[in-house]
Image (tube, rainbow, N blue to C red):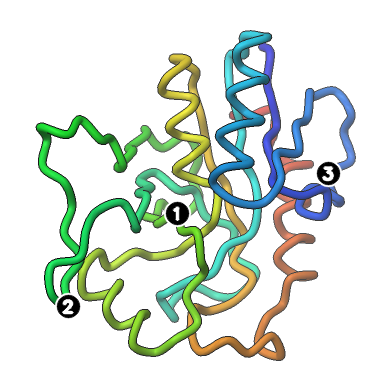
Amino acid sequence: MKVLLVSATKKEIKYYKNNDLEIIITGIGIPNTILNLTKKLSEATYDLVINVGICGSFKKHFKIGDVVEIINDKFSEIGYEEGSNIKEFDNSFKIINNFNVNAKTNLEHVSSITVNTVHGNKDSIKKIMTRLNPDVESMEGAAVFMVCQHYNTKCIQLRAISNYVEERNKNNWNIPLALKNLGDLLNQKIYEL
């Protein structure tokens, strides 16, 4: 099986010890992910793409450090403002911004949003929770799903929770724990996927 491991940063896979998977570091954010993963998948075919990284959780029942599998991801900012509300374009515009995949692990299965700007303001957090009620957010996930869907490539997204989505306070984050847990999972479970 030919597998591509996709991460936005080297830091997010620093605990991955095996060297037998091909790896691409796309860079942070939607544009970097789409550009670099599209280039990669236009040059080679893979049986599976595994997208890994950290994320913020909107839900407090998850623990910081938990690793989850994203089975639904959505670009949250594609749409238009109508008064104080954000609306999505109707189907006539043929904009696909919501992606669903079949679960492939026994991890907690969650929904995510992919954002250009991570949330850190009480008002914007409340609005996104009311509008979409996501479990977690990242800056790359839906972009990976979109590119993989275009190339008809199976994809899985695994994310470790590094923080809760709240007013920005890095003292409450635990990126080292999230990275260690993500690396441990990859090293133990990668061949079961």
Residue drawn at the location 67% of the way across and 51% of the way down? 28
Per the model, the C-alpha gap separating discs 1 and 3 is: 24 Å
Element type where label 3 sits in the image = loop
Callout 3–callout 2 Cβ contact below 8 Å: no
The residue that appears at 41% across and 51% down in the rendered structure is 109
- For numbered disc 2, what is the local secondary structure? loop
Nearer to the camera, 176 or 184: 176
Vertical side of 12 occupied by 167: above or below: below
Q: Which mark is residue 43?
A: none
Q: First in sequence: mark 1 or mark 3? A: 3
The local crowd at label 3, few if under 14, some if 14 to 19, many if 20 or more residues have their Cα within 10 Å, is some
The x, y position of residue 99, in whole percent, is 33, 38
> On the picture, is 163 further left or further right than 61?
right
Bin the neighbour count of mark 2 within 10 Å (Cα to Cα): few under 14, some 14-19, many 20 and up: few
Q: Earlier in the sequence, mark 2 or mark 1?
A: 2
Q: As rendered, which of 89 and 120 lies closer to the eye?
A: 89
For the residues labelled 2 and 1, the Cα–Cα distance comes to 21 Å
Q: Earlier in the sequence, mark 3 or mark 2?
A: 3
- The image's mark for residue 84 is 2
Please name the residue that numbered disc 3 is placed on: 16
Which quarter shows the N terminus? top right
The picture quadrant where one finds residue 128 is bottom left
Comparing labels 3 and 2, the label whose residue is closer to the camera:
2
Contact between marks 2 and 1 (CB within 8 A): the answer is no
Residue drawn at (44%, 81%), measured in percent from left and top?
A: 60
Picture layout, residue 108 above or below residue 21: below
Looking at this view, is 186 or 90 the one in front? Answer: 90
Nearer to us of marks 1 and 3 is 1
Q: Quadrant of the C terminus?
A: top right
Q: Which residue, given by chain and number where applicable, does mark 1 sit on?
A: 114
Kind of residue at disc 2: Ser
